[in-house]
Image (cartoon, rainbow, N blue to C red):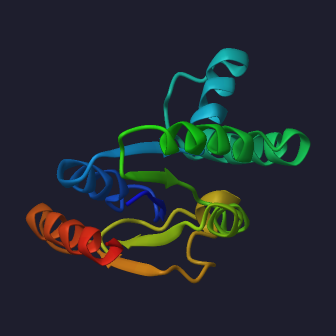
Amino acid sequence: MKKIIVINGYPNSGKTEFENFIAKHISSKIYSSIDPVKEYAKRYFGWNGEKTEEWRRFLSELKKFLVEEFDLIFNEVNNRINTFYISENEVMMIDSREPKEIERFKKTFKATTVFIKNDRVEKITSNNSDANVENYTYDYYIDNNSTLDDLEQKAIWFIKELS
């Protein structure tokens, strides 16, 4: 069973925890579509990893530029997925924020889309990437409004749903 899952949600909603719970129960790879953008920001613009509103906005705009001019994100994800298909892993999870990008991954890679909803976190809307996370109809919505144990049970349920 090789499955590709695109996961989204507001910052600090529990995406990483959900992915780690999935990876705990089934062999998985996790990749964030912002990773190459972060590398560019560190190498060429002196970003130190701090996630202030200003830097979040900068990363969002830099990602937009790299996508529009070079299709960088799709090419990076495509390379990761090609590696995934020849690996022992059963699940590839991709963090992605932008609805247009998510739809492209869904169509191209037959990905399943998931939104992690957490009413306890602030909805960041100061940049286009974070502001539009709910502007997509996802295949699954996972409520993360309880405990980590509850989220792990939802991850186990989700794995069974994929089978």
**Above or below, 93 relative to 131:** above
Splitting the image into 4 quarters, where does residue 65 fall? top right
Left or right side of 120 for 150? left
Residue at left 21%, top 72%? Answer: 154
Residue at left 59%, top 41%? Answer: 82
Residue 34 seen from this side: no
Q: Position of residue 25 (x, y in %)?
A: 18, 54
Splitting the image into 4 quarters, where does residue 118 fall? bottom left
Residue at left 60%, top 31%? Answer: 38
Residue 43 seen from this side: yes
Q: Position of residue 142 (x, y in %)?
A: 33, 76
Residue at left 28%, top 72%? Answer: 158
Q: Position of residue 22 (x, y in %)?
A: 26, 56
**Above or below, 37 relative to 32:** above
User: Front-most of 14 and 105?
Assistant: 105
Q: Residue furthest right?
A: 69
Q: Quadrant of the N terminus?
A: bottom left
Q: Position of residue 79 (x, y in %)?
A: 64, 37
Q: Quadrant of the C terminus?
A: bottom left
